[in-house]
Amino acid sequence: MIRSIGFCYSTFLRNGIDASSKNIKAVLWQLGKANSQKALYFYQLRTFTFLRRPMQLASLDQEQQFAKSLPLKWPEFVKEILPTLDAEKHKGQCGRIAVVGGSFEYTGAPYFSAMSSLRAGVDMAHIFCEDSAAAPIKTYSPELIVHPILTASCKMDKTVEETSKYLARQVAEWLTSLHCVVVGPGLGRNPLILETVAYVIEEVTKRHIPLVIDADGLYLLSVKPELLKNATSPVILTPNHVEFNRLTRAFEIDDTSDTEKLLKTLAKSVCPGAIIVQKGSNDLIAAAFCDVVVHCVEQGSLRRCGGQGDILSGLMGAFSAWMQMNRKLTTPNEWFIPVYSACAMTRRCSLQAFRKKQRSMLTTDIIEEIWKEFNTLFPLR
């Protein structure tokens, strides 16, 4: 029925009928009233975009229905958080993000993440990495701001705790200018670096900056499950199958045949602001503050190349930064918008890259498709 109502609305618009006319509203109201036992919901149209405040025709919670309807309407919702382009704006007003990651072994992951954010339209991308990874990352692109702050060995005459706090303070000095922080791509598992990043995460959540955690950042959380217990700001986790199982063991959640129930239980166990994206054939999205699990069923690539998760984390950082900058936020459930958007865009871009390169598709090919998908879904006026 939701699809039918959406079709009716779009038909009215295509034929030049005013979607706000009383007659149309009356017809849709009668439809909703007649089908109220079937949990029928719809959103009023504002010309070509949907209002964020849903009109409730049945008894279920409005915000749950907002999350359920998101897959049908997400491009329209995104238009409200995308920063407008204006010649009067200065550098940074379209978003500033940071990626905390990059080690001697893994220099590509933070590059993929940060570059994906820039290709999406973020103005500035910082990378806080291990000192040995800084030079290679700098050579990949002059667009990136690289800080070789993290180190794998203690400072002279300092303990691990003293060194990690000292390094974390250097990273924290930049937080006031950032709209989102991504932790994990290429981070590695050096104990000193992980301890440093744990302090960085505490500083990020204290300042209520949106946080995206992926890869070895999720490993850190499995080692320190209490790290985020008091975080009320948005914390977005993007585990794959192995990382998800590791997290459920760390939080001592019993296995269950109900995947959605397990996902919601894990989100509530992490922190009040947790949003978890379980990556798979379909991405499942659950939040600690909502009982609805959103499915992202956008078609993706048949090839899963290394680095695709880094693209997701970078796009997640971009959309989350724009959501943070948006002053019209009214409910926590609206954080499903940037999370779902990043999942859908990653899938759409990987599909386009696969159609061109097929078995030879690489992560860099997916990044090159980002601007095309943005122009397709959100063309400039």
Image: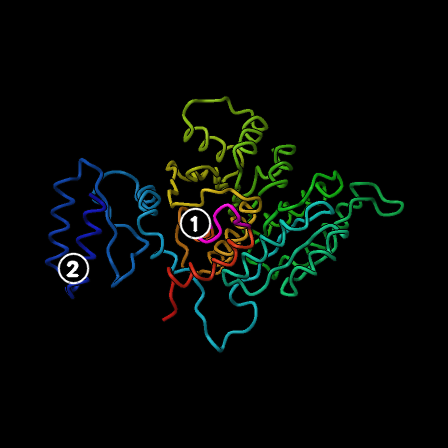
Contact (Cβ within 8 Å) of mark 2 with mark 1: no
Q: Position of residue 203 (x, y in %)?
A: 64, 49
Outermost residue on the bottom side: it is 88
Vertical side of 264 occupied by 6: above or below: below
Question: What amino acid does circle 1 point to?
Answer: Leu
Between 213 and 201, the one lying in front of the other is 213
Alpha-carbon span between mark 2 and mark 1: 32 Å
- Horizontal arrangement in the rendering, residue 265 relative to residue 23 (left or right): right
Q: Disc 1 designates what residue?
A: 351
Q: Residue at x 33, y 41 (%)?
A: 64
**Magenta stretch, overall SS:** helix
Between 356 and 13, the one lying in front of the other is 356
Question: From the image, which quarter does the N terminus lie in?
Answer: top left
For numbered disc 2, what is the local secondary structure?
Answer: helix
Q: Position of residue 185 (x, y in %)?
A: 62, 46
Q: Disc 2 designates what residue?
A: 12
